[in-house]
Image (cartoon, helix red, strand yellow):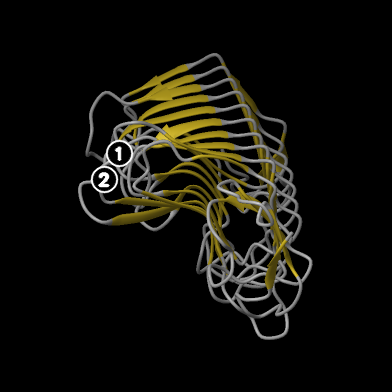
């Protein structure tokens, strides 16, 4: 689809109820100048990228994409909208191979520059990555997207290996404004050396109500996070459940919430933690930021003094408590790991 040869955009194209098998490239493709198209109820297999669209107001719903083989760019499961504003991807089933560096559901952009990815919704999809080390859902593209506001990723079921040092669900604009994004009520099952949710430059993003489960063997020393936060301001992580299943390798270290340098003013907790069989499990790892820091309301074992940074007024419920140490309150030192007082 494309507005070829004309000055006016094309609106309202509907592609529904088709079977796409053995496409050398995309199954459905739209270029610049096409808006408010609907791709519904189709089946795609053996395509390079089943659906690749550009523009605003698109709806991709109720489709099924799957792969027959692994390790080939001509048989990949996925849906992509470039430079999207106000688009919806909902109720799709995506199953199969997503190679390293590729994405099953992507809201990104085609060209570098001042590109907006805003007011989009990814909801109610089932994404099962049976092979490959790709990303399940990505909103924004590092190095290109400059505006990434008010996007919602909710109520999806995601399972896969994921990409090392990224997340099965990633919100990652490269620069500029990024406000009001939400990642909520998803079920994320991690089967490889990937984080669950990965945020970078994602200011005032809310991560809530998700269930994140680590379910794989770590053959070598590996540190992964349920929520990994880079260079983000005012992120809220609350009401999530972090679980570790049986069968982990002896080298696995899990950090439920892992904040990196450059992040500030986060609000973390309360969340639920069930660290079954994890060799090392840490509810939260924070960093100091001069003059500002995060508010923590979490629980776990041990004395929080020296364990992590938090602002005054933060709370730590100690699950291996003794008399006078069941609850710690941060009385001082907003840019230090000290100042926790047992109550």
Residue that carries the numbered disc 2 in the rendered image: 218
> Considering the numbered disc 2 on the image, is that residue within a helix, a strand or a loop?
loop
Q: Is residue 58 above or below residue 307?
A: above
Mark 1, Cα crowd under 10 Å, few <14 / some 14-19 / many 20+, is some
Residue 160: % across, % down: 38, 36
Find residue 248 and name its label. Answer: 1
- Residue drawn at x 28%, y 36% is 74
Residue 210: % across, % down: 61, 37
Q: CA distance from mark 1 to mark 2?
A: 6 Å
Q: Is residue 85 above or below residue 136?
A: below
In the image, taking residue 57 as reference, residue 219 lies left or right, namely left
Residue 123: % across, % down: 65, 32
Residue 133: % across, % down: 32, 45
Of the pair 178 and 218, the residue shown nearer to us: 218
Q: Is residue 83 above or below residue 332?
A: above
Q: Are marks 1 and 2 in contact (CB under 8 Å)?
A: yes
- Residue drawn at x 67%, y 37% is 209
């Amino acid at each position: 689809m494309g507005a070829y040869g004309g000055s006016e955009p094309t609106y309202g194209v509907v592609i529904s109820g088709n079977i796409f098998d053995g496409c050398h490239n995309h199954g459905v493709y739209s270029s610049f100048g096409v808006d408010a198209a609907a791709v519904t109820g189709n089946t795609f297999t053996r395509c390079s990228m089943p659906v690749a669209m550009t523009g605003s107001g698109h709806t991709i719903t109720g489709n099924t994409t799957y792969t027959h083989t692994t390790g080939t760019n001509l048989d990949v499961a996925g849906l992509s909208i470039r430079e999207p504003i106000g688009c919806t991807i909902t109720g799709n089933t995506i199953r199969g191979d997503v190679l390293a560096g590729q994405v099953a559901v992507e809201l990104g952009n085609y060209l570098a520059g001042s590109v907006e990815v805003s007011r989009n919704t990814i909801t109610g999809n089932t994404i099962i990555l049976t092979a490959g080390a790709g990303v399940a859902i990505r909103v924004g593209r590092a190095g290109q997207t400059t505006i990434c506001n008010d996007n919602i990723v909710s109520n999806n079921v995601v399972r896969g290996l994921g990409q090392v040092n990224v997340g099965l669900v990633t919100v990652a604009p490269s620069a500029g404004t990024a406000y009001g994004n939400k990642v909520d009520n998803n079920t994320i099952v991690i089967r490889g050396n990937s984080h669950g949710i990965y945020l970078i430059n994602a200011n005032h993003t809310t991560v809530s109500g998700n269930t994140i489960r680590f379910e794989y063997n770590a053959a070598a020393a590996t540190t992964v996070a349920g929520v990994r936060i880079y260079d983000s301001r005012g992120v809220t992580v609350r009401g999530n459940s972090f679980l570790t299943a049986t069968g982990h390798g002896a080298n696995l270290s899990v950090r439920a919430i892992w904040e990196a340098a450059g992040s500030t003013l986060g609000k973390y907790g309360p969340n639920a933690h069930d660290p079954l069989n994890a060799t090392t499990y840490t509810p939260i790892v924070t960093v100091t930021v001069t003059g500002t820091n995060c508010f923590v309301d979490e629980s776990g074992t041990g004395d929080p003094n020296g364990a992590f940074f938090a602002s005054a007024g933060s709370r730590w419920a100690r699950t291996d408590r003794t008399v006078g140490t069941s609850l710690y309150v941060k009385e001082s030192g907003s840019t230090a790991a000290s100042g926790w007082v047992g109550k």
